[in-house]
Image (cartoon, grey):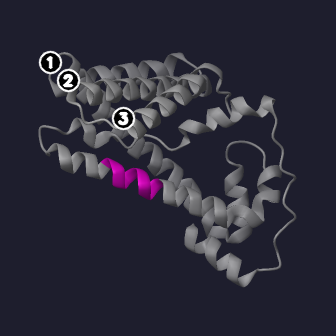
Amino acid sequence: MLVGLGCWWLLEPGSAEPLPPAQFSIASLPLLLGLLITVQGFETSRYLGNEFDQALRVRTMKIAQLVSAAIYLAFLALLTPLLGSAANAEGVAGIIDVMRIVAAPLGLFVLVGAVTAQLSAAVADSIGSSGLLNELTRRRLSVPVSYMLASGLAVAIVWLTDPFQIIAVSSRVFALFYALQCLIAWLVARRTGVGTFAGYAGVTAVGLVCLVAAAIGAPAE
C-alpha cells in the first residue's frame, strides 16, 4: 500500500483534491483521545519470559512499536492528497474505496490485510491473556488451561454481545491497562532506583493521558 501510494504521488501529481478544512474544538477532544489506542498491542513478547531473556524481549517490543509508528505516519503522509475522498467515505470500510482511487488491487490488499491483521491480533491477544493468567496465578493455571479459558470467554463475547460495543469497551480497558502499566513502571523504577526525573515525568504524563482517554474517549462512529 505504501509503494502504491508513493507511485501515485509520482505519476499523478496534479490529481490531488483540495484538502478538507481543518477543524478542532474542545468537543472534538474526546474523539482524538478515542484514537489514542489505535497503535497498540506490541507486548506479546512480554509474556515469553520462559523462552527469551528480558533484554531481548524489551528490544523486540521497542522495535515493533517504532516500526508500526513509522508505517502509520508514512501512510498518513502519503494519504494526504486523498483526504478529500477519505472525508466523504462512508462506514468503517471507506478506506477500501479510497485505495481503489489509487489502484484497483489496493482495495483487495486492504481487505486481505484487515482479515489477516485480525487473525494476528487474535493470536497475539491469546498469547498475552493466557500468559497473564499463568503469571497472575503463579503457574497454578497452566498455559493450555489459560488458552481454553480465554478462548471460551472470547466465544461467549462474540455470541452474546454487540461487536461494536465491545470494541469501544475494550479500547477503554486497553487505555486503563496501559495506565496501570505506567503505575507499575513508576513503582518498579522507584524501588530499584533506576528512574530519572524525565522518565518519571514521561510515564506519569502517559498514564494520565490514558486515564483521561479511558474516561472520555469517544467511539469513532
Horizontal side of 60 relative to 181 (left or right) equals: left
Looking at the rendered structure, the secondary structure element under dot 2 is helix
Tell me, for residue 138, which label it has, or none.
1
Q: Nearer the viewer, residue 107 or 198?
A: 198
Looking at the rendered structure, the secondary structure element under dot 1 is loop
**Discs 1, 2 touching: Cβ within 8 Å:** yes
Eyeballing the image, is 218 above or below 40?
above
Horizontal side of 7 relative to 20 (left or right) equals: left
Tell me what residue is drawn at x 20 percent, y 39 percent: 48
Instruction: Specify the amino acid type for callout 1.
Output: Arg
Q: Quadrant of residue 23?
A: top right
Looking at the rendered structure, the secondary structure element under dot 3 is helix
Instruction: Specify the amino acid type for callout 3.
Output: Asp
Eyeballing the image, is 99 above or below 15?
above
Q: Nearer the viewer, residue 117 or 42?
A: 42
Q: Residues within 10 Å of mark 1 (few under 14, many from 20)?
A: few
Q: Residues within 10 Å of mark 2 (few under 14, many from 20)?
A: some
Tell me what residue is drawn at x 29 percent, y 51 percent: 60
The residue carrying mark 2 is: 135
Magenta highlight range: 61-68
Q: CA distance from mark 2 to mark 3?
A: 15 Å
Q: Is residue 130 visible?
A: no
Tell me what residue is drawn at x 38 percent, y 19 percent: 153
For the C terminus, the quadrant is: top right
Which of the marked residues, 3 or 1, is nearer the chain's N terminus? Answer: 3
Q: Position of residue 107 (x, y in %)?
A: 63, 61
The residue carrying mark 3 is: 125
Q: Is residue 185 visible?
A: yes
Which residue lies most toward the front here? 197
Horizontal side of 156 relative to 99 (left or right) equals: left
**Discs 3, 1 touching: Cβ within 8 Å:** no
Q: CA distance from mark 3 to mark 1?
A: 20 Å
